[in-house]
Image (spheres, helix red, strand yellow):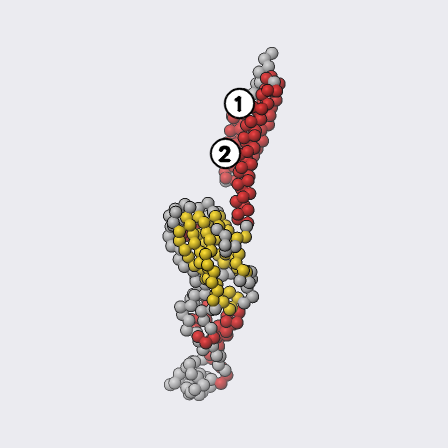
């Protein structure tokens, strides 16, 4: 009777390949193949490992213990490769979860990002920039100079803005109440200047910067007076006001080049910490700024 092992390396390759291919193709008739790849590879690898152990056992029995070191070598190499992938994944996860500061040079696969300046200034407008006084709508004689309305009075000094109906006066007061509340709630504008260094070509439209203060409120960048939240600015004469101005990063940034940009945002008095979230493809980084 021959003592040669009946299982050959080619058999192992065929078994592993068959398991992985069938494990992907068969389920793909029912669900997406991409959702089965990981499962098929795991099952196929387990079977491959079992077959290899069986093969090694037979080989050691027939050839002696001197073959153990050669049989262990592929296992060691596989463990090193798997360990490398695992360590790299953990490192990338660490970088994504890390909280950076304004002094850190933030590295991703395609670019380096850093905040090179943070400035804090007062709001671009205050109570002295516009007439924010409200009116007593109950004493106004509504109508134009040549027309009398509800109270039967003619135009006089009680109606300096020529309100036609009481709702006009109410709207006038409402927008000024909003402006005064904005000044009462917000006290400063923070502007960050950042720099992007491209390690590969950076697609400008894919680079996103979000601002999240510790209050949790949403900050919409480049919000002007056409937005309903800030429409009162237009009514008090601040038609060109932008609440959270940001520069246009522009188009693609070629490898080896650098580009600067700015992001500004109005801060409430109670907000003490701001997180800047930098997103580019699958890379997310968080920079924390203390006020």
Check residue 41 in the rendering and tell me which mark sits there, or answer none. none
Q: Residue at label 2?
A: 25
Which of 160/29 is in front?
160
> Does the image show residue 115?
yes
Quadrant including the N terminus: top right
Q: Quick one: label 2, few (<14), some, or many (20+) residues within 10 Å? A: some
> Does the image show residue 38?
no
Q: Position of residue 235 (x, y in %)?
A: 43, 73
Q: Position of residue 125 (x, y in %)?
A: 45, 71
Check residue 9 in the rendering and tell me which mark sits there, or answer none. 1
Which of 39/97 is in front?
97
Q: Is residue 98 above or below residue 172?
A: above
- Disc number lying in front (1 or 2): 1
Q: Quick one: label 1, few (<14), some, or many (20+) residues within 10 Å? A: few
Q: Earlier in the sequence, mark 1 or mark 2?
A: 1
What residue lies at 43% left-to-right and 65% top-to-bottom?
242
């Amino acid at each position: 009777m021959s003592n040669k092992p009946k299982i050959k390396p080619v058999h192992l390759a065929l078994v592993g390949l068959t398991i992985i291919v069938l494990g992907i193709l068969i389920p793909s008739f029912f669900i997406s193949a991409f959702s089965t790849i990981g499962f098929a590879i795991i099952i196929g690898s387990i079977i491959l490992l079992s077959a290899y152990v069986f093969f090694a056992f037979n080989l050691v029995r027939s050839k002696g213990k001197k073959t153990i070191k050669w049989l262990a070598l592929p296992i060691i190499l596989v463990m090193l490769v798997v360990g490398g992938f695992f360590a790299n994944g953990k490192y990338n996860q660490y970088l994504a979860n890390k909280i950076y500061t304004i002094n850190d040079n933030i590295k991703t696969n395609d670019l380096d990002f850093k905040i090179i300046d943070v400035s804090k200034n007062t709001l671009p407008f205050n109570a002295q920039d516009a007439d924010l006084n409200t009116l007593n709508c109950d004493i106004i004689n509504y109508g134009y100079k040549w027309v009398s309305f509800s109270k039967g009075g003619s135009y006089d000094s009680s109606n300096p803005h020529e309100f036609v109906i009481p709702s006009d006066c109410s709207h006038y007061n409402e927008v000024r109440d909003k402006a005064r509340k904005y000044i009462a709630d917000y006290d400063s504008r923070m502007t960050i200047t950042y720099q992007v260094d491209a390690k590969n070509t950076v697609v400008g439209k894919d680079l996103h910067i979000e601002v999240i203060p510790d209050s949790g409120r949403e900050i919409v960048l480049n919000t002007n007076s056409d937005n309903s939240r800030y429409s009162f600015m237009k009514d008090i004469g601040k038609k060109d006001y932008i609440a959270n101005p940001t520069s246009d990063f522009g188009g693609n940034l070629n490898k080896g080049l650098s580009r600067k940009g700015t992001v500004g945002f109005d801060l409430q008095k109670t907000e003490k910490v701001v997180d800047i979230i930098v997103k580019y493809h699958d890379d997310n980084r968080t920079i924390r700024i203390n006020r």
